[in-house]
Image (tube, grey):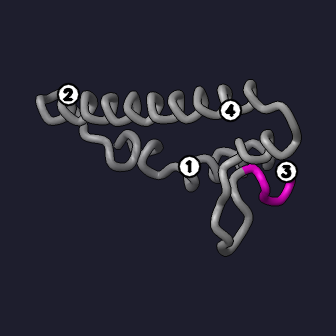
Amino acid sequence: MKKYLFLAVVGILAAPGLALGQGTPGSQQGGGQGNEQNFEQRKENILKHINQQLTRLQKSQKCVESANNEEALEACRPQRPPGPGPGPGQGPGQ
């Protein structure tokens, strides 16, 4: 019984906005023109980002497909400038 009470308290403390029926942080209650415009702008930005990624991937794919040796294959990989910390996919547990 104590275990379930503990889990209930942790759940309430972890999400105070949701526990009080306030929705997610930063969200606005009720519909409106502002929310609709924000949605459309966000959707447009996401689609633009996806299209940029697709273009980059297609370019990389063509490069790899046309590579005839190891050197040409390595030239297809983007060169990243040295910087602090691991790059994407190179962190702990990867």
Cα separation between marks 1 and 4: 52 Å
Q: Which mark is residue 36?
A: 2
Cα separation between marks 2 and 4: 41 Å
The reply to whether the magenta stretch includes residue 30 is no
Q: Are marks 3 and 4 in contact (CB under 8 Å)?
A: no
Q: Nearer the viewer, mark 1 or mark 2?
A: 2
Horizontal and vertical percent position of residue 92: 83, 59
- Who is closer to the viewer here, 72 or 49? 72
- Highlighted range, magenta: 89-93
- Who is closer to the viewer here, 18 or 67? 67
Cα separation between marks 1 and 3: 33 Å
Horizontal and vertical percent position of residue 81: 63, 67
Sequence-wise, the earlier of marks 3 and 4 is 4
Instruction: Report the amino acid beneath label 2.
Output: Glu
Residue tagged 1 = 12
Instruction: Report the amino acid beneath label 3.
Output: Gln
Q: Which mark is residue 44?
A: none
Instruction: Report the amino acid beneath label 4.
Output: Cys
Sequence-wise, the earlier of marks 1 and 4 is 1
Q: Quadrant of residue 49?
A: top left
Q: Which mark is residue 63?
A: 4
Q: Nearer the viewer, mark 1 or mark 4?
A: 4
Instruction: Report the amino acid beneath label 1.
Output: Ile
Residue count near mark 1 (Cα–Cα under 10 Å), binned few <14, some 14–19, many ≥20? few
Residue tagged 3 = 94
Q: Residue furthest left?
A: 33
Cα separation between marks 3 and 2: 39 Å
Q: Quadrant of residue 58?
A: top right
Q: Secondary structure at mark 1?
A: helix
